[in-house]
Image: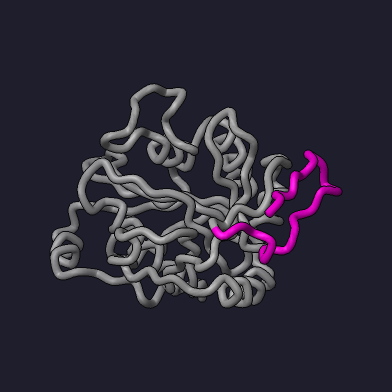
Amino acid sequence: MSITWLAADSQSHFPPVEKATDHGLLAAGGDLSPARLLDAYQRGIFPWFNKNDPILWWCPDPRMVLFTDDVHISKSLNKILRKGQFTVTMDRAFEQVMKACSAPRQNQPTDPDNRTWIHNNMIEAYTDLHHQGYAHSIECWKDNELVGGLYGVSVGKAFFGESMFSFVPDSSKVALIALCQQLQRWDMPMIDCQIYSDHLSRMGGEEIPRAEFIKRLDKLCSVKVSPSQWQLDADLPYAL
């Protein structure tokens, strides 16, 4: 199956998502402009590529999602939450969160040229989206130090999770739980988690057919919501 190559201009459009390969690869090329990224997310498409490689655009089938009212809190995690050792904020340290997500995981090379797919071009592009009120970070703090968190993109009533990190055990889980609780209050029922992982499955994530995901996404993204900086409701138990 041939892959569509996109020109770096607004006249170059994504093909139908059904044209994606069995692995979910849909297109290559284009750019990471805010307009291109927002158009992609509303279609269920996201970029994922290594440094120095062409931009690759993906739309896998099935799709991993987490419904915000189905997030799973284990007994051990519930104990951690009750201890109150973490506090959570939103949009206080977006670029710092992205850079933390880009740090090598255990058993990965430490060469900065081979860190992860979250390289400088991605950080710059998503920071632009953040300044426009579309990309958001959820930060988890312990003793005034950033120890965990995640970031993603919001369009309408949909949230698209991109990456998470944890310097202290369970900190990213606390951030995800706080995000789900806040999104429930805002009537945002679904987080796009992109592809399957055991970690997300244990947190309540599930795979759904791409066609169902796109159908849900069309409804959520069609809701008019003004982009803005986010803040966790003060009465949530983890709010700082």
Q: Is residue 56 magenta?
A: no
Residue 102: x %, y % from top left: 42, 36
Residue 47 image point, x, y percent: 59, 47
175 to the left or right of 23: left
Classify residue 29 by image quadrant: top right
In the rendered image, which quarter contains the N terminus?
bottom right
Q: Who's the residue at 53% across and 35% down the image?
A: 50
Estimate the x, y position of residue 238 in percent, counting from the top left.
29, 60
Viewer-closest of 228 and 119: 119
For the record, the magenta segment spans 1-22
Image-based side of 165 in relation to 30, left or right:
left
Residue 224, percent from left and from top: 68, 69
Q: Residue at x 48, y 74 (%)?
A: 208
Q: Is residue 76 above or below residue 216?
A: above
Q: Is residue 198 above or below residue 137?
A: below
Residue 23 in which image quadrant: bottom right
At x 53%, y 74%, the residue is: 209
Farthest residue, direction right: 11
In the image shown, does 4 or 233 lie closer to the viewer? 4
Label total for image: 0
18 magenta-colored: yes
Please name the colour scheme applied to the rendered image. one colour
Query: What residue is at 47 percent from the left and 42 percent from the top?
Result: 94
Is residue 99 toward the left or the right of residue 220 in the image?
left
Helix, strand or loop for the magenta stretch, by majority:
loop
